[in-house]
Amino acid sequence: MTSAVAWARERTASPEALLALVVDLKYFQKMARFCSRGGDPQAVTDHVRHCLGLSPEMEPDHGRRGPPSGTAGRCGHARA
């Protein structure tokens, strides 16, 4: 998970956003599609949270306020 985490850390400003982005990346890696917003399987989120060393109370932040116009991917993350 190291290269994906390094890439995600460069593109996020908070641990909550990092968690959301890495969960989405891992879900896409396994399922070849993005999950619907709020549809992240809890087991995947829990596993990624543990691997990132984040608090069990930390929840993913998919940018509820919304990204700048024209920058959102399917799950609300900025495109590279």
Image (cartoon, rainbow, N blue to C red):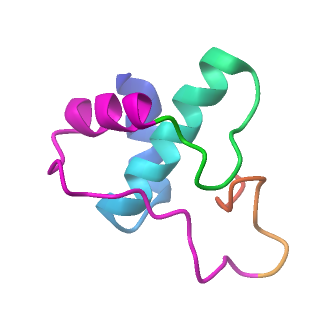
In this rendering, position of residue 24 left or right of residue 67: left
Q: What stretch is highlighted in magenta?
A: 42-68
Which image quadrant is residue 31 in?
top right
Looking at the image, residue 57 lies above or below residue 41: below
Q: Quadrant of the N terminus?
A: top left
Taking depth in this image into account, of 75 and 72 the one nearest to the observer is: 75
Please give the name of the residue rendered at 43% of the width and 26% of the height, measured from the top-left corner: 3
What residue do we see at 66% from left, 78% from top?
Answer: 66
Q: In this view, does 67 lie to the left or right of 55?
A: right
Q: Which residue is drawn at 41% across and 37% down?
A: 42
Q: Nearer the viewer, residue 9 or 25?
A: 25
Residue 39 versus residue 29 in the image, above or below? below
Q: Is residue 70 left or right of residue 53?
A: right
In this rendering, position of residue 24 left or right of residue 50: right
Residue 33, percent across and down?
76, 29
Tell me the residue at 30%/35% (across/down): 46
In the image, residue 70 sits, relative to residue 36, either above or below, namely: below
On whether residue 80 falls in the magenta region, the answer is no
Q: As drawn, which residue projects farthest toward the right?
A: 70
Residue 47: percent from the left, percent from the top?
Answer: 31, 28
Between 52 and 58, which is closer to the camera in this rendering? 58
